[in-house]
Structure formats: C-alpha cells, structure tokens
Amino acid sequence: MTRPAIAILTVTLALGLGGGGVAWGRSVLFVGNVDEGTVTLVDMSVLRVLGSINVIPDGTTPRDPAQAAAYPALVRAKGTNYVQGLALSPDGQTLYVSRGFLGDVAAFRVAGGQMLWRVQTSSVRADHIGLSRDGRRLFVSALSSNVVQVIDTATHAFIGSFATGDWPHVIELSPNGRLVYNGSLGNQLAPAGADGVKQLTVADVNTLAVVRTYSFDVGVRPFTFTADGRTAYVQLSYLNGFEELDLASGHVSRTMSLPVMGPAVGQAPSGYPNQAAHHGIALSHEERLICDAATVSDYVALVSRPELRVVSIIPVGDQPAEAQTSADGRYCLVTTRGPGPQA
C-alpha cells in the first residue's frame, strides 16, 4: 500500500461489495489507511485490491463537542488519525473501527460500507481494539483515560471497563479466547522516569476482573502468543528486537536483539518516532518463524524461533508498523506508515 497504514487484519469470508461482486470464500486483507479514513480490501489469492470502505462518512471532525474542542491541537501535534484499529465480526458482515483522534468506535456493514453505529470513548484517542471470540464484546483502549472500555456489539453500548497501565495501546485476546491482554505505553508527554505504569494487563473477558499484570521498564508495543498460551513475544519502546516472556513465571526467558540499519543508524533511541523502535510482530502458523517489523530501520526480520536466529532481513519501505500472518500461513503481512517511498 502506498498510503500510510496502521491497522491490518486478514480473514476468510464470503464478501459482498458495493458493486455487487462477491468474493466467495476468499482470504481478504483489510488495511486501514490512517490519513484517508478508508479501509482497503485486498483479495489475498491474487493480491488484488477489491475495493474500499469509507470509515468517515460522517465527516473529518469529531461529533462529540468535547472531542471537537481538543481536536485541532491533536492534529497539530500528531497529524490526522482516522483509523487506529480494526476488528471483524465472526460472520464477516460487520467491520469495527476505532477512529483515532475522532475518539470513537464505529461499525460498518462490509457489504456496501454503510455506517451502522458509533460510540464515543472517554479518551482523546480511541486506540487499538479487540473482539471476543463470540463477537459479543468489543474492547477498546481509551488511551488518555488509562482504561480498556468494553462495548456490547448487540446494544452498541458500553458495559464496563478495566484499569490498565498509563496509555493503554495494543489489545490481544489469549489463544483460548478467555483472557484479554493490554499493553500500556506509559505517558509519552511525561519525562522519562515519571511516565507512569508500563505493563501488560490481563483481564477476564467475561467478568473484566484483572487477573494478572506483567511490569516493564519501558512501554509495551505489539505482542503475540504461542498457540498453547504459555509464551508471549513482546516488543518494547526503544528496543531493536523483542523479548520472549514466560507467561506462567512472568520472567523474560530470552531477548532477541536485531540490527540497527538505514535511517536509524546513529540515531539516539530517545529520538525514535513515537518511541517505537520495532512495532509489529507475528508468528508463522507452525510457530517456527517470528516476523518482526523493524520500524526505525525499515526492514522486516524473519527469525527462527527455536534458536532465535535471523533467517532473513527484508527491506520493506518507510516505517513498517504492523505485522500479521495471512490466513493460509504463506505470508507475513506488514503495513508501512511513513511518508517516504514504500517497497
């Protein structure tokens, strides 16, 4: 994709598009385009764009008065952000989008792209989202409120929340679907050492009770799990690489350091954009390879998991920022979000 993108998901579904075409049983990639406020749909079987959904049909300014008042300053400081996170209903019919600095979460019909509903979060940024396995509960990181809020997808209303560390960010469901994990960044407006709590917060999907936390010295970036739910691979602010976390003991068993390359050479970690050295990590289906997006170094590393050995380093363009394994397991899908040339 040539436009800045931050959120991706890939699913297999029967897809009806506005023009009447149907992609029966195809694996479809959804790519969120931050600046355009669109989600591009890509047929993974032939790597061809099928169409797009406009996820800001109601305009480019917040509908909530309080959010609208804060919006100009947010845009001056960080630029526009209309697509922060994506989730798809289990039946493939409804797309959920957290709309960044609009501060809300909206739902859209995949076939036709109609907006179905929206709800305003308690935060100036509606960050990443995650959907329960049954599709009934949608979790959204309310970044400036230091909570994850929970939406009932049937009633389109908030039904609860749980406390996180400072500035909650990435949300993932455990492999068995019973737990929801949230990683917090720490308050990026505060000086180092006074930026609050950086942790993985683990809550019960149904009761929303926090059952465990894992503390870190720096902000938690994307993370992924082995299928047995015993191990997590966690990216952290300023770390060029990732850590292997034993979830039972809470101990870091191994750290993978990856090379600093390209635009990051000679750059102090304190100058990394958004404090994110690497942002995007995924496991291959057989869990033999780890795909790591080296955001500041403009490459993707494929790492052999058993021995944590680099298999390949692949240049991919400006600021790779999200990674996901394709539904058929053949690809690691990576978006880029920088303004420079894209591979």
Image: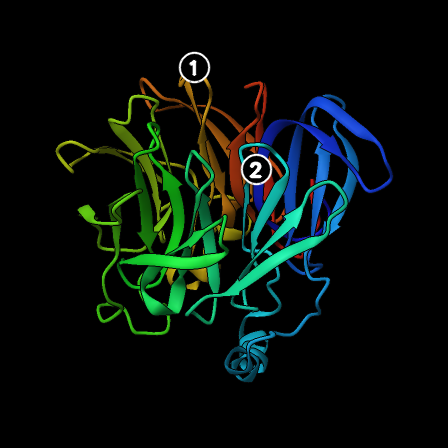
How far from the left and from the top, in percent, is residue 20?
Answer: 85, 35
How far from the left and from the top, in percent, is residue 56?
Answer: 69, 62
- Residue 213 visible from this viewpoint: no
| Residue furthest left as drawn | 249
Disc 1 marks a residue whose amino acid type is Glu
Disc 2 marks a residue whose amino acid type is Leu
| Above-or-below relation of 59 to 170 | below
| Residue furthest right as drawn | 19
Viewer-nearest residue: 3 or 96: 96
Residue visible at 87% across and 39% down in the picture: 19
The local crowd at label 2, few if under 14, some if 14 to 19, many if 20 or more residues have their Cα within 10 Å, is many
Residue 316, quarter of picture? top right
**Closer to us: mark 2 or mark 1?**
2
Viewer-nearest residue: 210 or 255: 210
Alpha carbon distance from label 2 to label 1: 19 Å
Residue visible at 76% across and 23% down in the picture: 46
Could you say whether the residue bearing mark 2 is in a helix, strand or loop?
strand
The circle drawn on residue 9 is 2
Residue beneath label 1, please?
A: 286
How far from the left and from the top, in percent, is residue 343?
Answer: 69, 39
Could you say whether the residue bearing mark 1 is in a helix, strand or loop?
loop
Looking at the image, residue 183 sits to the left or right of residue 338; the answer is: left
